[in-house]
Amino acid sequence: MLVKLPEAGADLMTAPFRSSLRSRTYATETLNTPVPAEVIPVTTPDGARLRVHAYGPADAEVIVLAHGWSCALEYWNPQINVFAGDYRVIAFDQRGHGESESGTRTFGAEQLADDFAQILDAVLRPGQRATLVGHSMGGMTIQAWAKYYPEQVAQRAAAVLLATTAARQIPNRATVIPFLNDLVPAPSWVAKVMFGTPLPLPGGAAVSAIAKSRLMTPAATADEIDFGLSIVRSCRPSVRAAVARGLLHLDLHGAAANLTVPTTVIAGSADRLLPEIHSREIADTLADAGYLDRYVILPTGHLVNIEAPQAFNTELQRTIRMGRRGLVAVAG
């Protein structure tokens, strides 16, 4: 199924309002948006200008962060604020998300891979390798890149961390809607209507309560809920819907086997959007190929790096160390 991402004029939500949702100020300081050290210009072959920010010292080890569906680079604030003191942290808006343009290409695995390859070309020097981190659709982006650019993996990646992501069968396993796929199978049209309809996502206490119960856990703080929900609300509804329709048919099964560097997989035990079965399947693929470094299940919902930032950051630091050591450590 080919899905064309809509242009910016397709939504009533203004760009300043969307930007304000991504740049709110919180009592939890690590959720606040830092000023980038550099804005890196990236324009795709079809003319889409992508927003790419760099934080931290220009000569430091590089971390590249790929966000998920309906998010933006600010989603990674809890990691940028912690790691940018010692690392060169790269974060970007996926095509059509945040302030990145949609361009003319249709959404799909090859498009995700091509955009990611071009971003890596823009942010890495020849011979330089980075720790690649992907959450949700960002993890799918890294898997797609490994599928279509397998020769680049060893050249560009030192290590990989995939967080609460999937490779296939997304609508058949989600349990966000009560009872569906928990007790009875969910017809594909239900997911298409629920997630593929371009409706604005409102704020308010009721929506926050739903987000806490279905996307996060009761342990999530008010700041974490507001931060995660505001990031998602900042996505244009038409883009959110179009990408959701494309994700329903995405199939990257086996692509993780091409991640020929130490790779960590993190799942959320209470993740209803991409339940733990997805992460376990990817981890099994990596283990069979000999590249799984570590499989971790954290007590969170889908927004694992927001709900458990200290545990997530500890795993990211470990992934960076494993990238320095290389595959010998994984094989051992």
Image (tube, helix red, strand yellow):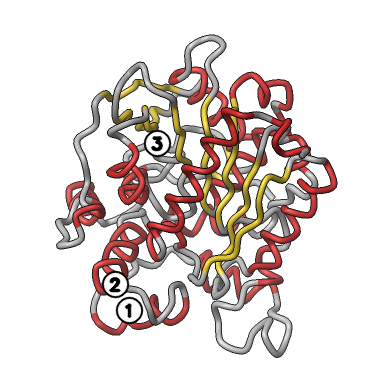
Q: In which quadrant of the rendered image does the C terminus lie?
A: top right
Camera-near label (1 vs 2) is: 1
Query: Disc 3 designates what residue?
Result: 92
The residue at the point 56 percent across, 11 percent down is 127
Between 311 and 269, the one nearer to me in the picture = 311
Q: Position of residue 114 (x, y in %)?
A: 59, 28
Residue that carries the numbered disc 1 in the rendered image:
207
Query: Whole-percent x and y of residue 20?
Result: 18, 52
Mark 3 is surrounded, within 10 Å at the Cα level, by few (under 14), some (14 to 19) or many (20 or more) other residues, namely many
Q: Which mark is residue 202?
A: 2
Q: From the image, state whether disc 1 or disc 3 is nearer to you.
A: 3
Coordinates of residue 3 in the picture (x, y in percent): 59, 48
Element class at badge 1: helix
Q: Earlier in the sequence, mark 1 or mark 2?
A: 2
Please tell me whether residue 171 is drawn above or below residue 147 in the rendered image: below
Please report the residue visible at 62 percent of the width from the left and 29 percent of the height from the top: 325
Q: Is residue 125 above or below residue 298?
A: above
Q: CA distance from mark 1 to mark 2?
A: 7 Å
Amino acid marked by disc 1: Val
Query: Which is more N-terminal, label 2 or label 3?
Result: 3
Residue 42 higher or lower than 111, as above or below: above
- Residue 50 placement: quadrant: top left
| Outermost residue, front side | 332
> Residue farthest to the right?
288
**Residue 202 located left or right of residue 141:** left
Q: Hey, which quadrant is residue 274 in on the image?
A: bottom right
Q: Nearer the viewer, mark 3 or mark 2?
A: 3
As helix, strand or loop, the secondary structure at mark 3 comes to: strand
CB contact under 8 Å: marks 1 and 2 = yes
